[in-house]
Amino acid sequence: MTVLLSVRQLQVAYGGIQAVKGINLEVNEGELVCLIGANGAGKTSTLNCLGGLLKPSGGEIIYQGQDLQRIPTHERVKHGLALVPEGRGIFPKLTVAENLRMGAYARTLQVGELEQAYERFPRLFERKEQLAGTLSGGEQQMLAIVRALLSKPKLLLLDEPSMGLAPLMVQKIFETIAEVTKEGVAVLLVEQNAKAALQLAQRAYVMESGNISLSGDAKALAADPRVRAAYLGE
């Protein structure tokens, strides 16, 4: 498999606090990789650093053979890198349709693309003229994911997509993530629902206190007694 993203000795610091302490991870083309761990482990800091919302204090990030730190944040979407942040990051005072068009701001929307986007989540079509801020939490998450997909990413960074959602909505979101990877988009998923994430992913990393403590095949990690006790409630 071709390596799409390679993170080497990545460090992220807030003032004197080291949130990420020199981690290594990789994502291959078309692969779904999950990053699990407790609150405060450094997962969101890692994803925000990849998306350009934070600057690393050390290490390197190689994306498609390039030093990602040399690519400005606003240019990363043009290179096929899309982040759906924790909290979704939609534009609440724009309509659903306007939000989706913003997803393709860096390129020209092709005929039929919006219609295809609505097919993924028909509920968004029903609410396309509604202000995004008035949507339910699940609908906002749908919108955030579809908006990111309209940028035609090679790598989709997802931070806690199931947080606060009803079980049926969580199931739909995870089904969509699985569909996206089948379409050839690589996904790096940060997720508190460790059981669902490990079932979905090909590979996984376990993060504890700013370090990667375990990594490997997702199914094998799901069977690891340490993971089962710490994250699966077993």
Image: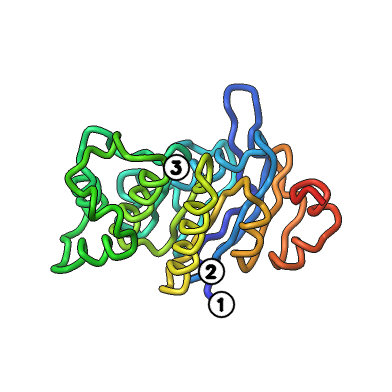
Q: Position of residue 94 (x, y in %)?
A: 20, 38
Q: Depth check: 7 or 66 in front?
A: 7
Horizontally, residue 97 falls left or right of residue 18, namely left
Label 1: state its secondary structure.
loop
Tag 2 residue: 31
Q: Residue furthest left?
A: 111
Instruction: Mark 3 or mark 2: name the one nearer the start of the chain.
Output: 2
Residue reaching furthest top?
15
Amino acid at circle 1: Met
Rendered position, 223 above or below 183? above
Above or below: residue 110 compared with residue 40 = below
In this orientation, which residue lies closer to the viewer: 137 or 179? 137
Residue identifier under label 3? 85
Which three-letter amino acid code belongs to the residue tagged 2? Glu
Left or right of 153: which side holds 9? Answer: right
Q: Say if mark 2 contacts mark 1, CB within 8 Å.
A: yes
Distance, label 2 to label 1, CA atoms, is 9 Å
User: In x, y percent, where is residue 88?
Assistant: 41, 41
Rendered location of residue 166, percent (x, y):
51, 46
Query: Circle 2 sits in a helix, a strand or a loop, which is it?
Result: loop
The label on residue 33 is none
